[in-house]
Image: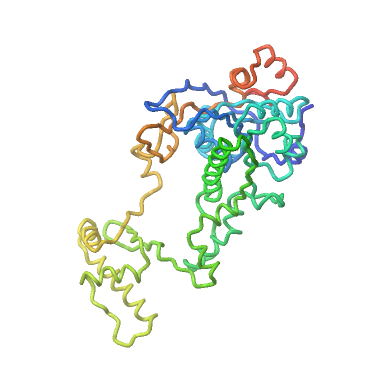
Amino acid sequence: MRLANARAADTLGLLEGPRGGAALTVPAEHEPAAPAPLPAWRVLDMSQAISGPYAARILADLGADVLRVEGPRTDVTQHFGVVRDGRSGMYAQMNAGKRSVGIDLTAPGAVDLVRRLASTADVLIENFRPGVMDRLGLGYELLAAANPRLVVLSITGFGPDSARRALAPVIHAESGLLARHAELDGRAPTDLPLALADTVTGLHAVIAVLAALQQRDLSGCGQHIEISMLAALAASDDHAHAAIDGGSESYSSRGTIWAAPGGPLLIAAPPKHAWVMLSRRGMLADPAPAGSDLETKARLRQQAIQDWMSDFADRAALIAELERAGIAWADVSDSADKFADNAHTTALPGTDRRVVALPYRFSAASADVRRGVARRGDHNVEALADWLGLDPADVRALAADGVLLSADAG
């Protein structure tokens, strides 16, 4: 029996959103020039939003056979970005290269089907709220009993003992990152313009999965990995040492933006370090009178830097002097600029849509999207035949029972 209302769905920890979506022709897969660096491990992706799907997308680009399990409700990322062929830009970015099977977890027999898929998988990724997988009958102990080699990755917000909802903005705030940024800029806290907590967690998740698979090759046994978004962001905080040691925080890596000919220009250092590098080269004389206090010195020297930069007739001459002083600089570009020449993107097979590419450049392998972006259930027949040996009649029977969903279901 299918779930009929949002409140019932929420007891499973599912994200709410509109159902269905426009039809999409799934492009044929393509083979890059070089082989994928990873074996075709089977990855069952039961995750939603960004953190889990991003980890699964990376594994797919690296060669894994990723099968995405999609339920009746549309993933929240379908609400972000330009929609083409029924898929938003963010959804495409997180789910390119995967196959899709539509499963209504509330239908009789659906959980058994997932168990069977997990019994042939190498990895299962989920980011339900803690306790949901156990309530569904898909807890790690049960799955491992049927498949001892299975690696299960569970992504949480605050750890396995907290069922608190945790999207990226929540983690940004609780991590101290927003307060630090606001203090530096002397303003009220505001959220970041990207889901940093999600993507950082996804990257740590891939590292953990690869380590667990390596250990499995030695021991023959899989294991359960739990990663919280809060812990992942904390582990990626290069200024954590200051809070741990109880000292004052150092922001030597923080850039400073200056007014310059031709528009804003960033110097990859705070003003005091820029002063040292420029004055050492004899480019600036100290404007602070002898015996000035630190605050006066800092203010006058910062103004001297700004005056020096403003005196240049053109940007090229200023940049040449910064280069001569050994100072790293940057134009403050629009975010779209870095993708204008497609240098950091990859084409989805058979379409004119592009998504961000992985940054890995192997000398003897290729990490690339090998499939387009599937609709829910596009691979019901194909994937269930590959993973479980089911024939089309078996698949039709599961669809008739309401276990399997297609793109236009719901």
Question: In x, y percent, where is residue 59?
Answer: 51, 35
Q: Residue farthest to the front? A: 218
Quadrant assignment, res 388? top right
Question: In x, y percent, where is residue 189?
Answer: 55, 62
Asked if residue 351 lies left or right of residue 224, the reply is left
Image quadrant containing the N terminus: top right
Examine the rendered structure and indicate whether residue 68 appears above or below residue 394. Answer: below
Total label count? 0
Question: Residue at 53% of width from left, 70% of height from top?
Answer: 245
Question: Residue at 49% of width from left, 27% of height from top?
Answer: 372
Question: Residue at 37% of width from left, 84% of height from top?
Answer: 293
**Between 134 and 273, the one nearer to me in the picture:** 134
Examine the rendered structure and indicate whether residue 104 appears above or below residue 320. Answer: above
Q: Residue farthest to the bottom? A: 291
**Between 330 and 340, the one nearer to me in the picture:** 330
**Between 270 and 366, the one nearer to me in the picture:** 366
Question: In x, y percent, where is residue 9?
Answer: 74, 37
Image quadrant containing the C terminus: top right
Question: Residue at 53% of width from left, 40% of height from top?
Answer: 210
| Colour style of the rendered protein structure | rainbow
**Between 203 and 344, the one nearer to me in the picture:** 203
Question: In x, y percent, where is residue 262?
Answer: 27, 56
